[in-house]
Image (cartoon, grey):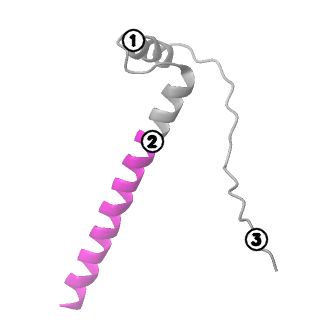
């Protein structure tokens, strides 16, 4: 029997949108300052930042629930 090759399937998402107002101002300023290089870079960095904040919030909520549970058990 031959070895099976496992295929890695990378997730993809296509995003095509126009932004206006404050988000557009933020994008243009970050690009001018060299903090982002493209719209793709801005989306990737923004999603990573948002995801990190959501995980931190979830962790705080879990810690609070655990703390409350411990206090009720005492």
Q: CA distance from mark 3 to mark 2?
A: 34 Å
Q: Is residue 17 magenta?
A: no
Q: Which residue is mark 1?
A: 29
Choose the circle earlier in sequence order: 1 or 2. Answer: 1
Viewer-proximal residue, 25 or 64? 25
Residue under the image location 64 percent in, 18 percent down: 18
Q: Is residue 47 left or right of residue 62?
A: right
Q: Is residue 67 magenta?
A: yes
Q: Which residues are magenta?
A: 48-74
Q: Secondary structure at mark 1?
A: helix
**Quadrant location of residue 63?**
bottom left
Q: Secondary structure at mark 2?
A: helix
Contact (CB < 8 A) between labels 3 and 2? no
Where residue 10 appears, as percent x and y from the top left, is 66, 50
| Label annotation for residue 48 | 2
Q: Is residue 41 left or right of residue 33?
A: right
Q: Nearer the viewer, mark 3 or mark 2?
A: 3
Q: Which residue is mark 3?
A: 4
Residue under the image location 29 percent in, 76 percent down: 66
> Magenta stretch mostly in which secondary structure?
helix
Image quadrant occupied by the N terminus = bottom right
Choose the circle earlier in sequence order: 3 or 2. Answer: 3
Disc tally is: 3
Q: Secondary structure at mark 3?
A: loop
Q: CA distance from mark 1 to mark 3?
A: 49 Å
Residue under the image location 49 percent in, 39 percent down: 47
């Amino acid at each position: 029997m031959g070895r099976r090759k496992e295929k890695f399937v990378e997730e993809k998402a296509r995003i095509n949108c126009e932004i206006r107002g404050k988000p557009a101002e933020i994008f243009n300023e970050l690009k001018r300052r060299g903090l982002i290089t493209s719209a793709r870079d801005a989306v990737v960095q923004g999603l990573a930042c948002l995801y990190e904040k959501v995980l931190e919030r979830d962790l705080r909520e879990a810690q609070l629930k655990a703390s409350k549970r411990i206090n009720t058990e005492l």
